Amino acid sequence: MVLESLLNPLSAEKRPWEMFFIGFAYSSIAILLSLWIFRDQTSLIMVFLTVMAAIPIVYATMKLEEGKDLVISKETDLLKEHNKAIVFLMFLFFGITISFVVWYIFLPPESLNVVFDKQTTTIQAINNQVSGNAFQQLSTFLKILLNNIKVLFFAILFAFIYGAGVIFILTWNASVIGAAIGNFIRSNISEYASTVGFTKFSAYFGVASLGLLRYSIHGIPEIIAYFYGGLAGGIISVAVINKHYKSKKFHHIVFDVSELLVISVAFLIVAAFLEVYVTPLLF
């Protein structure tokens, strides 16, 4: 397919920043096609189309990383190689997220409600769960951590079953984060325009504040955790497909996957700590 031919994992590891523009293009094309063909279901279809475009590069990455397990014995060198994949996948994620932000800012109100319908509902549900006295509450910390581990489990499961299935969870998160940040920016543009007297301009950008910009603080380590978990699940998936479980190197693959999972959980602990103990101090 055309989008698949734009980049491969080896070139992406050398020029990871290019993945930002690839991700931006993937999601922008998905939004336009969804509005054109499936307008009433745009908020979900755009996520699926973005995922479809990203699956080839993500699955090729899983195959490449699993292959490294077979030829690299030193674990520190292997982790460095995996980190190259994590970096360019993060650029892909940021490109998708920024695309959603830009579209959220500049879409007219009547289209905005259609394109980000499900995302807005999700954000409002998250806001209703946020406790105002979360500071120093261990129970809240544990609840958030367990919920994030549940999402991590699904990321690993999707990656194991579908190879590149983790990209669905990450793209959905990108759409929600993009809507939240876009809403924050759009609301502030509306407020400023209203202050200086541009009434029509203010009405165009005016939307109800969703107040989820605080997600960005702990959201980044969460996303990194899901990438590590998804990479672990994808490596095992490829190993099973290629029947490398019969190889003498399989124990090394399992050990490598275990390390990736430990790193993933560590990032989730950091994310939960930031969400409970740091974010309330800033917002």
Image (cartoon, rainbow, N blue to C red):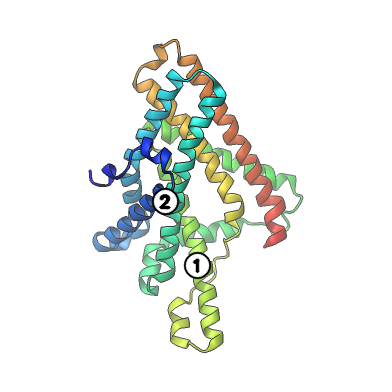
Q: Name the residue under label 1.
A: 183
Q: Which of marks 1 and 2 is nearer the N terminus?
A: 2
Label for residue 204? Answer: none
Q: Is residue 190 above or below residue 265?
A: below
Between 149 and 14, the one lying in front of the other is: 14
Q: What residue type is labelled 1?
A: Asn
Q: Which residue is drawn at 35% across and 34% down?
A: 60
Label for residue 20? Answer: 2
Q: Residue at x 33, y 38 (%)?
A: 8
Between 239 and 46, the one lying in front of the other is: 239
SS at badge 1: helix
The quarter of the image holding the N terminus is top left
Residue 181, image x and y in percent? 52, 62
Between 5 and 199, the one lying in front of the other is: 5
Q: Residue at x 70, y 53 (%)?
A: 278
Q: Which amino acid does label 2 sit on?
A: Phe
Residue 63, image x and y in percent? 37, 28
Gap between marks 1 and 2 measured at Cα: 21 Å
Name the residue at the right extreme: 136
Name the residue at the bottom extreme: 197
Q: Is residue 155 visible?
A: no
